[in-house]
Amino acid sequence: MSNRILIIEDEESIADLEKDYLELSGFEVDIESNGDRGLRRALNEEFDLIILDLMLPGADGFEICRQVREAKNTPIIIVSAKKDDIDKIRGLGLGADDYMTKPFSPSELVARVKAHLSRYERLIKSGTPENDVIEIRGLKIDKTARRVWVNGEEKPFTTKEFDLLTFLAANPNHVFSKEELFRNIWDLNSVGDIATVTVHIKKIREKIETDSSNPQYIETIWGVGYRFRI
Ligand code: CA
């Protein structure tokens, strides 16, 4: 299976050039020209690497880098015309893996993409034996890599969905009220209330349950809260 790469870049000519070279090297490539859409896709879909421009309409590259890094470890290569911006993103410690200044040679980009992908794959493989994994029937939660599989198929999870699922699965057969869950997963300054918990439970069920109305993992205990069934 070929690696999937997401390019978030609003300059069409640059995005197309990057895409052409990467496709010639056998990668599957998607382009997003808008920052908000790019961020959404980076969070909700599985890409093996992200090439990220900094100045974008919608969310900018700084924000995208920060949010993606909070949720997952996908390698990020920042590409920017301004060296100052690259210094800034380094200074902020947003967790990008590499930086390139425009203009750059496309073959240099391809070489760096390959280097980061193989480094990342080695990292995942070498980390596997020590990863903290919860396996319950067809559900596999890798707490270390923050990844979830249902019957062998990986499902994308947001940070809070992952935290909530992991909390429940790590404490099976224990009924938690919505208030308890909210307190444990969301910090005190979070905007929201216990309705947030309900919404997140619904989203998690859509991902892990075969039939959301007859859940096999997260049970609703009416009037009390939720319980993870083991
Ligand atoms: Ca730009």
Image (cartoon, rainbow, N blue to C red):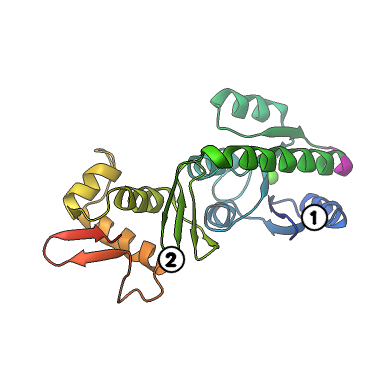
Name the disc covering residue 95, or none.
Answer: none
The furthest residue to the left:
223
Asked whether the residues under the numbered discs 2 and 1 touch, taking CB atoms below 8 Å apart as contact, a structural biologist would say no
- Alpha-carbon neighbours of circle 1 within 10 Å: few (<14), some, or many (≥20)? many
Task: Write down the residue under mark 2.
Answer: 207
Image coordinates of residue 49 in percent, x first then y, are 67, 47
- Ligand 1 quadrant in view: top right
Where, quadrant-wise, is the C terminus in this rendering?
bottom left
Element type at mark 2: helix
Image coordinates of residue 54 in percent, x first then y, are 64, 40
> Mark 2 or 1 closer to N-term?
1
Asked whether residue 111 is in view, the answer is: yes
Q: Which residue appears at 27% of the width and 49% of the height?
A: 171
Task: Write down the residue under mark 1.
Answer: 19
Image coordinates of residue 215 in percent, x first then y, are 31, 71
Residue 27 position (above or below residue 101):
below
Q: Which residue appears at 33% of the width and 53% of the height?
A: 169
- Alpha-carbon neighbours of circle 2 within 10 Å: few (<14), some, or many (≥20)? some
Q: Which is more toward the observer, 37 or 29? A: 29
Image coordinates of residue 111 in percent, x first then y, are 83, 40
Residue 83 position (above or below residue 33):
above
Q: Which is more toward the observer, 47 or 63? A: 47
Residue 126 position (above or below residue 217):
above
Q: Which residues are the magenta region?
A: 103-107
Q: Which is more toward the observer, 23 or 142? A: 142
Type of amino acid at the residue the image marks with label 1:
Lys
Most frequent secondary structure within the magenta stretch? loop
Residue 166 is left or right of residue 93, and the answer is left
Where, quadrant-wise, is the N terminus in this rendering?
bottom right
- Res. 109 image quadrant: top right
How far apart marks 2 and 1 lie (CA) works out to 31 Å
Element type at mark 1: helix
